[in-house]
Structure formats: C-alpha cells, structure tokens
Image (spheres, rainbow, N blue to C red):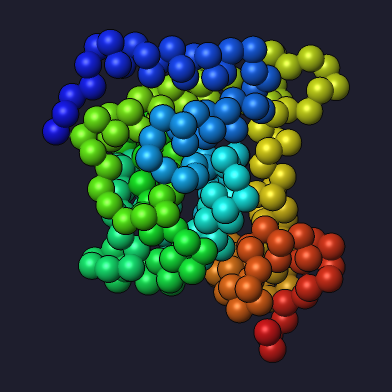
Amino acid sequence: MVAVSDRERERIAAVLADAVRGAEPGEVPERLCAVAVRLLPVSGASVALCGEGIPVPLSASGPRAAELMEMQATLGDGPCLWAAETGAPVYVPDLRGGRDAVRWPVFAQQAAAVGVRAVYALPLGDRTACLGTLDLYRDVPGELAGDEVRTAQLVADVLTAALTALPLGEGDGLRPPGEEPWLSALATGHDVVHQAVGMVMAQLGVGADDALARLRAHAFAQGRTVFDEGRDVVGRRTRFDDRD
C-alpha cells in the first residue's frame, strides 16, 4: 500500500477544514459528503447516525446517495448497517459478484439496479462507541487503493470530530432560545418512523422489533422507503391490522 505523505495529509486536512469553515451545524455533514466525493474516486457519499433499530440519515451528496442510505434503512440490512453494528469498516468492491452479492443479496440487487457497483462504509467513532457511518458509493467495481483508504478514514475522522463537537439540541446550552436543534431538523424522518412503530405496536399488539419489521416489510412490498411508510402510518393513511 502507498502511504499518505505528511504533505498530502496536510493538504487533505486543509481541504476538509476549508469545507466546514463558516458552516452552520446542520451544513457540516453535507459539506463533508461533498468534499469526500471530490477527494476520492467515488460517485456519492452519505452520513447516518446510529439510531434505535434504524439509522438516522443526516445528509447525502445527491439524490442517489440518499436513496441508497434510505434503501438500507428500509431493508434493515446492508454494508452501512453492518459497519455501524460492528464499529469496523466494510469495503464492498463488487455488488454483482463474489461473497458481497451473497452477503446482502437484496440490497446488492437494488443498488446495482440504480447503477452502484461498490460501497465503502466507515464507522464514525470506534468499536466501543460508534456514532454512525460515512458511506461511499461508486459506479464501477473495485477496491480502494491504500492511499485512498487512508484519505477516506481521514474524512471519517474529521466528520467524527465535527459531529461530537456540534451542539446536538435540547439542553446543550449552546443553542439560541427558540431555534430548532440542527439534529432534529435533519432527523425528522427517523422520528416519524419511531412514532409509526408505536402506532403499529398498538394496532397489532406486538413488540417494537416486530412492529418495525412489519413496517419495513410493508414498505419494501410497496416499493417505498420505511420513512415514507412511517409518514403514512402517522398521517393515518395506512393502518396495520391482523389481516395485513
């Protein structure tokens, strides 16, 4: 592997610092997604935080990256969720062949259908305290080179530092009165899913895990995201019962 020189590391760090300079808290994830696409041979990037049973999508470099993030949240499976669960990087060089296609067959098929052939998921934090993941997507199969892996990790490290330093919301003492917490504004879909899970629990008399599984299955069967399905449940446009 080719090591990143001190000069190159300094250059990358300067690019990352420039990307977030003057940014509002809610803009930081989006800016770092954009700079990851500039620095690496990838076509898209997204960021999600670990949530209870479902990832919290924060930002994406574009519509397709956002779709892939929501796809894994809907399926409850995929390399990005695995990276969050294990706290270790997951590099998937080819979604159409080898063990990667077998490991996550449904996600692999759906991702390939929208033109994505490789996924690289890096945990934010470490094995003992994983905050979420930086997820990188590429249109062509292949491994990241050694220097590219190091660059991706540097982006993930900066993103981790930025997220842990940002005021998260209620009770942090750092937000002006009356201003909406930046994390709440970005994670509204996640909150809706949790509300929907509670309603499905009440309708079916099941536990939270089973309710979320039912919500995901119904969304997948309808070709929708779990976030869209959750909005319909909360809006009382969709109801679950024993015949569902």
Residue 233 in sight:
yes
How many numbered circles does the render carry?
A: 0
Position of residue 92 measured from the top left corner of the image (x, y, whole percent)? 31, 54
Q: Is residue 87 above or below residue 155?
A: below
Image quadrant containing the C terminus: bottom right
Residue at 66% over, 54% down: 194
Query: Could you tell me residue 137's position as x and y percent?
Result: 43, 49
Residue 91 point in image, percent of width and height: 29, 49
Q: Residue furthest bottom?
A: 243
Does 150 sit above or below residue 105?
A: above
Q: Residue at x 58, y 68 (%)?
A: 216
Displayed quadrant of residue 125: top left
Q: Nearer the viewer, residue 178 or 36?
A: 36
Q: Is 145 located above or below residue 96 in the figure?
A: above
> In the picture, residue 182 is in which quadrant?
top right
The residue drawn where x is 63% and y is 63% is: 225
- Check the picture and name the quadrant holding the N terminus: top left
Name the residue rendered at 33%, 28% in the picture: 151
Q: Is residue 116 above or below residue 207?
A: above
Q: Is residue 210 left or right of residue 148?
A: right
Residue 201 makes an appearance in the image: no
Q: In front here: 130 or 83?
A: 83
Of residues 119 and 181, the one nearer the viewer is: 119
